[in-house]
Amino acid sequence: MMDLVISDKVHDESRQGEALLLEPVAGKNNGRKLYIESYGCAMNFSDSEIVASILSEKGFETTTDYTNADVIFINTCSIRENAETRVRNRLKEFKVAKSKNPGMVVGVLGCMAERLKAKFLEEEKLVDVVVGPDAYRDLPNLIDQVDSGQKAVNVLLSREETYADISPVRLNSNGINAFVSIMRGCDNMCSFCVVPFTRGRERSRDPFSIVNECTDLFDRGYREVTLLGQNVDSYKWTASEEAEGAIVNFANLLELVSQINPDLRVRFSTSHPKDITDEVLYTIAKYDNICNYIHLPVQSGNSRVLELMNRTYDREWYINRIDAIRRIIPECAISTDVITGFCTETDEEHKETVSMMEYVQYDFAYMFMYSERPGTLAAKRYADDIPEATKAARLTEIVALQQKYSLVRLQAQIGKVQRVLIEGFSKKSKNDYCGRTDQNAMMVFPVDERYKPGMYVNVIAERCTTATLMGTIVG
């Protein structure tokens, strides 16, 4: 077996690299070792699986120790300044390793590669190769360029690339959960966000390739897929004229994937309030294996601030979508993203964000202080004029509020029997299993030898913390 390290920073910047197992491609070992780390969103994690697939086909063996690697790639995120700082610090560690192994190739992939290509190559001289999210097929050629003594870069964005024909190497070694990318890029121009500039315009994969990938995963023992896109609700695929221009939207795609097998759980991320339709909600309600969980970023509860953010909806529209979710899928869990201290945000406007959180009572939230990103519309148009202390105080307030509601939402599950997909052992004890409920809550429960990871069990929730349910298998 070969093993690949990927530092999974999906909504959790505290986690470190994990050793994961990857099958080698028979007869193609070229004698060179590859090490990959990934930071940022789930899409970056999915992209690393594509990169691993492309390079394993070229015979690269992988290693868990970057000091023994011939090629190091770090898949990067530009969404916040802190993420970029962590990547720079990591590159400096790689530079030390390279000084002891001059033939080592160090490369940056992903969003930072697209945004800071010249800075990495010329000013800081930290890397040899820079590759944007749409250029991963070119990696073998770019590595060859570096081997010949040149720096290499390809950050060209594409209007067509979806990597639909590439079977990703599954880096999450539990063999139960998998990411499936359904589209790339983003057409929304949120003023605080770099994604449209680093990942390009929206492109939807054809539904046949998505269904085939999910079917293959199920046949290989996977029991949960998460459909990924920057804005899944805007998924739209149009057939050729020969097929009379049939259109598949996100609701149609959800239905197609859910029909593969009732034992294949279907999740998705991320939704956009302006695009999520009642049709999608009714589709979720129709199929038991589409999980009752929606991540619906609000960012701010104030209409003026939302307009400055170019979110293209207002407070009333967002509340309308929340009310629709509660009406059509009463048991649905809802999580969100919130930014505090956006340009010119007043105390009263911040209070509207607080009141939105009180109205929705989110199950979970990712909360951040505003971090100005160079090149974004906000950086060009507005002054980052909220003092850091004020941003921090507002963040502290909403974090405390969210902890309260996270506890309330989990306490409401106590005494209820939940269907849980066993994902593996608890991090704290080999005597306990862990897995997520339909509503995406983590459940921990004692091991029962009749059941193994990858199986569904009914678990009664008996107690909870602010983040986890604890219970016992029943029935």
Image (cartoon, rainbow, N blue to C red):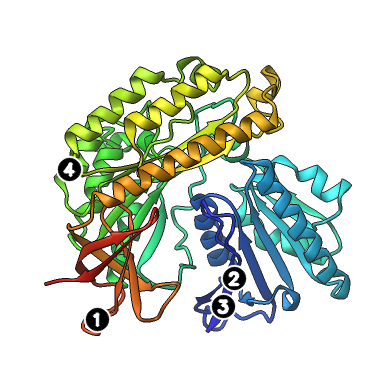
Is any atom of residue 73 visible in this view? yes
Q: CA distance from mark 4 to mark 3?
A: 40 Å
Looking at the picture, which amino acid does disc 3 mark? Answer: Asp
- Viewer-closest of 385 and 355: 355
- Viewer-closest of 256 and 19: 19
**Contact between labelled residues 1 and 3, with CB atoms less than 8 Å apart:** no
**Contact between labelled residues 2 and 1, with CB atoms less than 8 Å apart:** no
Q: Earlier in the sequence, mark 1 or mark 2?
A: 2
Q: Earlier in the sequence, mark 1 or mark 4?
A: 4
Is any atom of residue 372 visible in this view? no
* Residue 143 occupies quadrant: bottom right
- Residue 285's disc is 4
Image location of residue 281, percent across then percent down? 23, 37
- Residue 5's disc is 2
**Contact between labelled residues 4 and 1, with CB atoms less than 8 Å apart:** no
Left or right: residue 241 compared with residue 152: left
Which element type, helix, strand or loop, lies under badge 4?
Answer: helix
- Residue 448's disc is 1
Residue name at image x 23 percent, y 79 percent = 451
Q: Earlier in the sequence, mark 4 or mark 3?
A: 3
Give the class, few, some or many, for how many residues have Cα within 10 Å of label 2's Cα (few <14, many ≥20). many
Quarter of the image that includes the C terminus:
bottom left
Q: CA distance from mark 1 to mark 2?
A: 31 Å
The mark lying in front, picked from 1 and 4, is 1
Query: Label 3: which residue?
Result: 3
